[in-house]
Amino acid sequence: MKEAHRDAYLAAHNLACRRGERVLFSGLTLALAAGDALEVRAPNGVGKSSLIRLLAGLARPFAGSVERTGTIGLIDERPALDEHLALGKALGFWTRLDRSAAAFDRPMLDRLGLGELLDVPVRYLSTGQRKRAALARLLGQQAAIWLLDEPLNGLDTDAVSLTETLVAQHCAGGGIALVASHQTMALPGGKRLDLAELAR
């Protein structure tokens, strides 16, 4: 277990989320410790992405509270890469900000199928390529807690398998992974939360 991830912890206590005048879900309680993974399943509109934002601290809950120990790494529909920069320079920006060389680990970039794309502007990348670039940035963050919103969108079979492997390795190293996905994803431990059961 990585020393930096040893104390990782993510919990929600009686969490409720409101969008406009509608309460999407309420009474959500969970607790994840180092090495845990959780799959969140629900139909569109129930609040999977909203839950991710609440857990990341990007939105305030309607009720309840969130407790976190450890840094957060987030993948959602916005890859946070400058559309006007070549991929290599866009990743380089985050490498400097995160103070980590891991995002530019060439074997990992090749493993993600990005090694030959570093000179390509981000705006020309496919959905799957952007997802893999977001994974490179996530790895560079070396965050203890991974929050992944639809991480498999646009990925082919090999890239899905690689994503599952990376999540498993992250958890084996003491990290936490919470994954919201429409697609079935193999996660260590097999824990699952059906958000629809808490929908109002």
Image (cartoon, grey):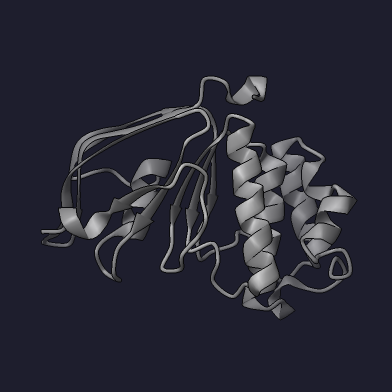
Residue 15 drawn at (x, y percent): 21, 41
User: For the view shown, which residue lies furthest in the front direction?
Assistant: 189
Q: Nearer the viewer, residue 193 or 149?
A: 193
Please say whether residue 82 is visible from this viewpoint.
no
Q: Nearer the viewer, residue 55 or 164?
A: 164
Residue 100 to residue 59: above or below: above
Q: Residue at x 25, y 33 (%)?
A: 65
Please say whether residue 144 is visible from this viewpoint.
yes
Q: Which quadrant: the C terminus?
A: bottom left
Q: Residue at x 81, y 67 (%)?
A: 86
Residue 55 drawn at (x, y percent): 37, 42
Q: Nearer the viewer, residue 96 or 191?
A: 191
- Residue 122: image quadrant is bottom right
Residue 88 to residue 108: above or below: below
- Residue 126: image quadrant is bottom right
Residue 99 drawn at (x, y percent): 75, 35
Residue 1 drawn at (x, y percent): 64, 24
Left or right of 12 in this view: 149: right
Q: How many marks?
A: 0
Residue 45 to residue 147: above or below: below
Q: Residue at x 81, y 65 (%)?
A: 114
Left or right of 126 in this view: 190: left
